[in-house]
Image (spheres, rainbow, N blue to C red):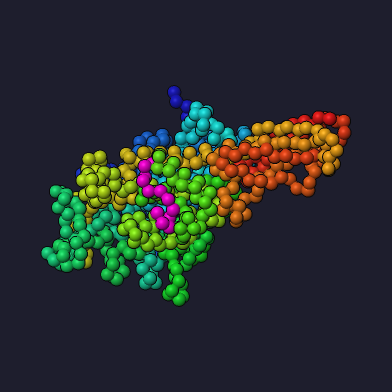
Amino acid sequence: MRASRPAWIRSALALTAIVATPLPAQPGGNQPPRDTVRKVLTIPGLRDGPSTFPLVNYPQMRPKQVGVMDFEHYHTTAELNYWMERWAKEKPDLVEKVQVGTSFGGQPIWQLIVTNRKTGAHTTKPAAFFEGGRHSGEITSSESVLWLTWHVLENYGKDAAITRLLDEKTLYLRPNNNPDGADMYKLTAQANRSSVRPTDNDGDGLLDEDPGDDLDGDGFIRQMRKFVGAGKGTHVVDTLDPKGRLMRAVGAGRGDYLLYPEGIDNDRDGRYNEDGVGGLDLHRNYPYNWRPMAESTGRGHTQFGAGEYPLSEPETRAVFLWQMTHPNISVTNSMDTSVPMHLRGPSTCLASECMFPADLKLVQHYDSVGNSFTNYGLAGDVYWTYGTRGQPKGQERPEPLFGHGPDFGYFQMGQVWYGDELWNGGREKDYNNDGRIDQYEVLRYNDERFGGRGYQMWTKVLHPDLGEVEVGGIDPKFWAQNPPAEDLERWARNQAMFNLTMAMDLPKVEITDVQAARVRGTPKDSATHEVKVTVRNTGRIPTALEQAKRVHMVKPDMLTLEGTGVTVIGARPQEFWMGGYETRVLTVRVRVPQGQAIPMNAKVSSTRGGVASREATLTP
């Protein structure tokens, strides 16, 4: 007989099951059930449009077996919370669950602290921080953080490298920094960029008054086309697909159809879905190089989605405060979708002009390491590599991103800080070898690999204003923005392995040897002994990047000698920095009482390299 589960697990499983339990299946196969109106989700905030939307029971959100980990589905907020709580209860020596903030809608923001607590407090060890779920719909990132957590916990005590990692270092793991947005995206047809805070996106003085409408009841806001006659539209049916699923833009007055996002012009301004739920961007809300969404002169820089002021959003503030109060963090990856790219700073300048050469060399190394795991192809800085992608060579015109995490991470925190973009939108195969992957090749790959599930045939719907229209096209959630659930683990795992590699490269100070000898002859000072302490940084990453030194983000590493009767000659302890894999010998002159053997402790304290100590004896 199977032992009964503890009460906390039973209650958490019940909550997960409420979200995961299928509604009655509908005729027609793979589409989510349409009978969802009896269950609704209310989005927090006061807005001029609707806040309550029908729940959709997506197959992609259902675990294969409730309470058993799998990465062939996306985890709801309830399920993510369940796993964090379960690990904290079942593995208390390795996992601590902490609330690090409260979302705009009042939900707790949870984070795990993963380290072997028997080998020291997490704050005494070098640390890495990995975050997912900042952007409402970019949910692959949450799965990658979850996969990394599961992987290290499953392999602790079995894999020597992972065991050493958790014995010596700390992982701060936050899979779902925006639970309000995640709930809306995962449980309703609605989607947005990031925060659900009501925002006036179209400048008409109203908040969130024109969200998308699921006209055909399939659980997605897709595309909508209206046949208007030859030469009267902007699009034609792309004949490359014999099933007619693709539309091709040909320009005004040259097409047969007008194309719209699926929905109704709720505010009667001639546009569709231009002011849906929310609109701020939590990744433009950081304090470094922040710019407002509007300014008075009309000549200055602005930043769409920046928020009312830096750190105005509680989700971003929760990251900022954790980072500032945990300076032992050397590496951060705060992930999104779906370029794909290993994305880092700078965001507003050329790296060669505004980064220290040693720091740039280090992150360029990690660009290469990242691609060795993920094969994204694109890796580099936000301003140039990301900002000019797709532009003709020699005509590049980068645009800065303000208030951006990677800029904050490098210039203010002095960290190796990535904001990686997972998933490639199905751009997998260049079938005709012309050097680019067009929409038909994406569709063809979807047909071959996933049976065409990423696209819906066009179906007729009676629109209240446009009359007869057709709704169809690409799956906006589990194809355009995130991989199909059956391909999810590949993307989550590959990204997590890159993050794991950076965590293993964290700086860590060790004392490998202490030698003490009596001072012979007549010393110039009052020293009786000279102590040589050999210190090593076992990590590739320095104990302080050059930028961290410049902004005084971390204190210098420090050697102290302690012992009864031991007096260090000189007013200050020795201060220094350790480069990656560096070993150095530090010499300290001390005075001790004559004729006694004195026990002594040599201690190295490093903000980002942790703490190390070693005992020695000063002999007469």
Q: Quick check: is 184 in the magenta stretch?
A: no
Q: Which residues are magenta?
A: 374-385
Residue at 39% x, 55% y: name it.
386
Indicate the position of residue 275 as horizontal and vertical percent values. 35, 64
Is 494 on the left-hand or right-hand side of 310? left
Residue 336 at x, y percent in the picture: 41, 50
- Residue nearest the viewer, comparing 8 with 144: 144
**Quarter of the C terminus within the rendering:** top right
**The furthest residue to the front:** 521
Q: Is residue 5 above or below residue 112?
A: above
Residue at 78% over, 48% down: 571
User: Residue 540: x, y in percent?
Assistant: 54, 40
What residue is rendered at 52% in x and 51% in y?
A: 357
Front residue of this view, candidates 389 and 289: 389
Which quadrant of the view contains residue 216? bottom left
Q: Residue at x 85, y 38 (%)?
A: 522
Question: Position of 487 compared to 252: left or right?
Answer: right
Residue 271 visible in the picture:
yes
Say whether residue 174 is left or right of residue 137.
right
